[in-house]
C-alpha cells in the first residue's frame, strides 16, 4: 500500500496535479475577504494630452492629430503658427488614464498612466502638459500634469539601415501622484439607515450563512435578498458610526460553501480539483487503459449499551488496468483524485487524463463543474 501511495504522489507531481486537502470542511474566513460594501467602488478616468520636451523621439509630421493639437494649444495662448511648417518630433500625443479610488477628496493626488497614440519612438524624459481627466459621464474629476517615467528606452532610429535597441515599453509611462482630484464622487454610505454587501462569488448557501452570522451578532438586521446581495439595517446605536459598524461586520467569521469544480489547463497538463468532487459507478476504456469504479455500502453498529446509532457508509473501489500489465488497485472511498492518481501510476499522459475527465463529465459520472483554461 505504501508503494501505491508513493506512486500516486509521484504521478501527481509529474503532471502538476493539485490534490484537494484532507479536511472535509472549508476554511472559515472573514466577511471582508468574500464580500464588499455595495457602492464603495473606483471610477475610471481618461483624457487626451501632449507630452513635450522629447529629444526627437516624438511623433512625426504624419501624425495629423499631434500637429493639430499643437496648433490649437498655441492658438489658445495667442501664438499663431503655420501648420505646414510645424515640426512635431519633440512632442507626442498621448492618452492619460487613471483610477479614482473611493472616498478621495478634492486636492488628493492619484497616479496616472501615459500612453502614446501616435508614432513616437519614446516618451521617456518628456513632460505631460495639463490634461483634464473625465469619467464615463463626461465630467472632469481630475487634472494631470508632470514628468513621465517609462522605465525603458529606445536607442537609435528606424530606417536608413540604422540599428535600434529597445528595453521594456518606452511609449508607455507612469507619473506617480501626477493628477490632482478636482471633484469628489460622493459615496452615500449607510443612506436611509441601510447598506448592502455584495458577494465576490454569488452563492445561495454562502449568502444565507453570511446573513445568519450578522444576525447572530446584531439581531435580525440582515437579509439575503439574492445569492449576491445582503441587505442590512444599521442598528440605532451605530447610526452615528457607520464606519465602525461596517468594520465590525467585516471581521465576522463565515464559512463559504464549497463548490465541486475541476479546473483543467490543457497547455500545461495541470489539473486542480476540489475535495467535494464525487464520482458515480462507471467503467471507462481508452486505448490501453481500463478504469472501473464500483461502490458498496457498509453498516457500522454501535457498542452494546452505548446509546449510539448505526452508521451507513458508502465505499468505492477503483481499478485501473493497462495493456502492459501495469495495475493499480486503490483502497475504498475512491474519488476523482484517486482516479487521476491511478492514471498517473500507469503512465497516462496529461492529454489522456484530461480526455477521460471530459468523457466522464459528458456521461454524468462526475458531479462537478469542469472548466477548461
Image (spheres, rainbow, N blue to C red):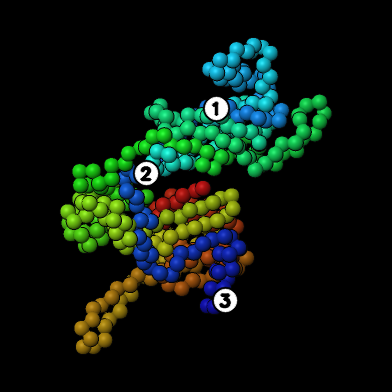
Question: Picture coordinates of residue 258 (x, y %)?
Answer: 36, 59
Q: Is residue 133 above or below residue 83?
A: below
Question: Picture coordinates of residue 68 (x, y %)?
Answer: 59, 17
Q: In this view, does 23 lie above or below 368?
A: below
Element marked by disc 1: strand
Q: Which of marks 3 and 2 is nearer the N terminus?
A: 3
Q: Earlier in the sequence, mark 2 or mark 1?
A: 1
Residue shown at 56% from the left, 64% from the top: 12
Element marked by disc 3: helix
Residue closest to the eye, 160 or 192: 192
Q: Is residue 288 left or right of residue 155?
A: left
Q: Is residue 367 above or below residue 103?
A: below
> Does the image show residue 259?
no
Element marked by disc 2: loop
Q: Quadrant of residue 168?
A: top right
Residue located beneath label 2 in the image: 103
Tell me the mark number nearer the camera, choosing from 3 and 2.
2
Residue shown at 70% from the left, 41% from the top: 167
Disc 1 crowd, CA 10 A, few/some/many (<14, 14-19, 20+) = many
Disc 2 crowd, CA 10 A, few/some/many (<14, 14-19, 20+) = few
Residue closest to the eye, 121 or 111: 111
Residue located beneath label 3 in the image: 3
Where residue 269 is drawn, which disc sits there?
none
Where residue 49 is drawn, which disc sits there?
1
Q: Earlier in the sequence, mark 3 or mark 1?
A: 3
Q: Distance between the residues labelled 3 and 2?
A: 59 Å
Q: Is residue 79 above or below residue 227?
A: above
Q: Distance between the residues labelled 2 and 1?
A: 26 Å
Numbered circles on residues, count: 3
Name of the residue lying farthest toward the right: 161
Amino acid at each position: 500500500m505504501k508503494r501505491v501511495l508513493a506512486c500516486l504522489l509521484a504521478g501527481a507531481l509529474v503532471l502538476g496535479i493539485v490534490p484537494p486537502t484532507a479536511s472535509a470542511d472549508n476554511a472559515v474566513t472573514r466577511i471582508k475577504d468574500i464580500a464588499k460594501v455595495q457602492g464603495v467602488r473606483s471610477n475610471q478616468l481618461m483624457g487626451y494630452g501632449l507630452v513635450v520636451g522629447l529629444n526627437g523621439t516624438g511623433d512625426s509630421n504624419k501624425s495629423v492629430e499631434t500637429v493639430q493639437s499643437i496648433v490649437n494649444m498655441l492658438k489658445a495662448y495667442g501664438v499663431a503658427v503655420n501648420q505646414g511648417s510645424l515640426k512635431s518630433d519633440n512632442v507626442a500625443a498621448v492618452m492619460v488614464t487613471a483610477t479614482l479610488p473611493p472616498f478621495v477628496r478634492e486636492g488628493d493626488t492619484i497616479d496616472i498612466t501615459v500612453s502614446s497614440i501616435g508614432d513616437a519612438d519614446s516618451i521617456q524624459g518628456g513632460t505631460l502638459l495639463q490634461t483634464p481627466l473625465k469619467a464615463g459621464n463626461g465630467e472632469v474629476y481630475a487634472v494631470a500634469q508632470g514628468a513621465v517615467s517609462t522605465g525603458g528606452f529606445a536607442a537609435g532610429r528606424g530606417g536608413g539601415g540604422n540599428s535600434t535597441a529597445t528595453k521594456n515599453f518606452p511609449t508607455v509611462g507612469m507619473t506617480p501622484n501626477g493628477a490632482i482630484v478636482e471633484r469628489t464622487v460622493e459615496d452615500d454610505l449607510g443612506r436611509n439607515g441601510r447598506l448592502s454587501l455584495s458577494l465576490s462569488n454569488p452563492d445561495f448557501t454562502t449568502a444565507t450563512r453570511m446573513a445568519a452570522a450578522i444576525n447572530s451578532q446584531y439581531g435580525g438586521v440582515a437579509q439575503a435578498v439574492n445569492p449576491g446581495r445582503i441587505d442590512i439595517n444599521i442598528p440605532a446605536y451605530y447610526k452615528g458610526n457607520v464606519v465602525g459598524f461596517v468594520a465590525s461586520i467585516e471581521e465576522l467569521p463565515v464559512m463559504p460553501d464549497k463548490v465541486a469544480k475541476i479546473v483543467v489547463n490543457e497547455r500545461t497538463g495541470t489539473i486542480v480539483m476540489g475535495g467535494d468532487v464525487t464520482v458515480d459507478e462507471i467503467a471507462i476504456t481508452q486505448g490501453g487503459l481500463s478504469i472501473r469504479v464500483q461502490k458498496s455500502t457498509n453498516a457500522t453498529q454501535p457498542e452494546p449499551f452505548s446509546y449510539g446509532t448505526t452508521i451507513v457508509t458508502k465505499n468505492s473501489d477503483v481499478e485501473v488496468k493497462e495493456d502492459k500489465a501495469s495495475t493499480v488497485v486503490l483502497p475504498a472511498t475512491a474519488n476523482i483524485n484517486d482516479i487521476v492518481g491511478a492514471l498517473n501510476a500507469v503512465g497516462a499522459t496529461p492529454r489522456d487524463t484530461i480526455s477521460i475527465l471530459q468523457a466522464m463529465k459528458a456521461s454524468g459520472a462526475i458531479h462537478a463543474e469542469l472548466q477548461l483554461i
